[in-house]
Image (cartoon, rainbow, N blue to C red):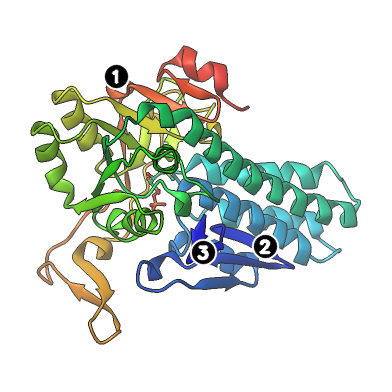
Amino acid sequence: MRVNGEAFRTVWMEGTVVKLIDQPRLPHRFAIADQPTWQHTAQAISTMVVRGAGAIGATGAYGLAQAAQMAPEDGFHAAVAAAAAGLSATRPTAQNLFYGIRTVLRAIEAEGDNLPAARQAAVAAAEAVADDDAACCRAIGEAGAPLIEAGARISTHCNAGWLAFVDWGSALSPIYAAQRAGRRPFVWVDETRPRGQGASLTAWELGQEGVQHAVIADNATGHFMARGQVDLVIVGSDRIAMNGDVANKIGTYSSAVCAARSGIPFYVAAPTTTIDPDCPTGADIPIEERGADEVQFTWGWSDDGRFLRVRTTPDSSPARNPAFDVTPAELIAGILTEKGLVPATPEGLARVVRR
Ligand code: MRU
């Protein structure tokens, strides 16, 4: 996608350096954060310099390729295994992270003790993970655009745009396709407490593409649905279980319940790399719990250009911070994948899952 007229991906690799769009600085600053070692790359994933299922999947893949480039000849495979474990431990919920790491690991292992070939295969596999993610998201846009009629009012939660993937995005990709086809959709952007991915990232992306939108507090979504001002919902996903249950950013479940109450179709958009073949139901999806400080504080740029963190809760109040929730399959109208619209059922998912 373009930023001020220049094409960017969310993550890429130059030599042995992993390059990331520095997401916590958006929407106020656009900067690239260089990660010189796999340990830096892992830290960037856990601190959410890069976030979003597809983006961290590609970053994990590049991080392992980076480790393979830098691992010593003596103890090469042990060093690669340690990096794979370290990168896998960064965030527990998004299936794409494990898919990306596993894909690169398999490519390395296939070369056995031919280390130059293993290093080369690692980079090629990471590039393939990133290219595949971008291609899938573009295809999701084409598959989903027909759902969006001229002037449609769409609700979305969190950021499942191009910043959450390598390019194009999942939930926002059909919206970009409809916009480019001249259908001028309008998007209700849930703010997405506590980290504000909707307010900061989705709103910024939509603005860059000229898509009409309004940021709303998360707790305003049901109100606009009940008033007949939402035609459909499209959200992303971090992991899809084989029964059709979907994990996505905390607050998605509430949006789905409100949509069902108002008779609004609720779609999930995700590449098939988000489907976990080893996960039977939503209850089996590990839900990340992040630090209480993300709820107790908020942060942003002051008028005089300083990045400030301010406390919004009493000093003594504890907080809880689950990062994701699970929406049951019965509330989902369909899952938009690169292979088309699939029902959120065991049969539908079995047809498209990657093993
Ligand atoms: O915690 P994040 O920002 O990494 O959350 C992941 C997400 O971006 C959302 O849950 C999104 O809707 C899923 S699609 C990448």
- Residue at the (31%, 40%) spot, across then down: 185
Badge nearest the viewer, 1 or 3 = 3
Badge nearest the viewer, 1 or 2 = 2
**Is residue 146 placed above or below 112 in the rendered structure?**
above
- Residue at the (53%, 71%) spot, across then down: 32
Location of residue 184 in the rendering, given as x and y in whole percent from the top left corner? 33, 42
Crowd band around label 3 with a 10 angstrom C-alpha radius: few (<14), some (14–19), many (20+): few
Instruction: Say whether disc 3 or disc 2 marks the residue closer to the N-terminus.
Output: 3
Residue receiving disc 1: 330
Crowd band around label 1 with a 10 angstrom C-alpha radius: few (<14), some (14–19), many (20+): some
Name the kind of residue labelled 2 in the image.
Met
Please name whichever residue, 49 or 229, is drawn nearer the observer in this view of the structure: 229
Instruction: Say whether disc 1 or disc 3 marks the residue closer to the N-terminus.
Output: 3
| Quarter of the figure with residue 297 | bottom left
Badge nearest the viewer, 3 or 2 = 3
Residue receiving disc 3: 5
**Is residue 309 placed above or below 289 in the rendered structure?**
below
**Is residue 271 placed above or below 28 in the rendered structure?**
above
Location of residue 248 in the rendering, given as x and y in whole percent from the top left corner? 35, 40
- Dot 3 falls on a residue whose secondary structure is loop
Mark 1 → mark 2, Cα distance in angstroms = 41 Å
Instruction: Say whether disc 1 or disc 2 marks the residue closer to the N-terminus.
Output: 2
Please name whichever residue, 256 or 226, is drawn nearer the observer in this view of the structure: 226
Mark 3 → mark 2, Cα distance in angstroms = 21 Å
**Is residue 245 placed above or below 48 in the rendered structure?**
above
Name the kind of residue labelled 1 in the image.
Glu
Residue receiving disc 2: 13
Mark 1 → mark 3, Cα distance in angstroms = 42 Å
Location of residue 115 in the rendering, given as x and y in whole percent from the top left corner? 88, 55
Please name whichever residue, 201 or 309, is drawn nearer the observer in this view of the structure: 201
Instruction: Say left or right for 267 vs 193.
Output: right
Q: Are marks 3 and 2 in contact (CB under 8 Å)?
A: no
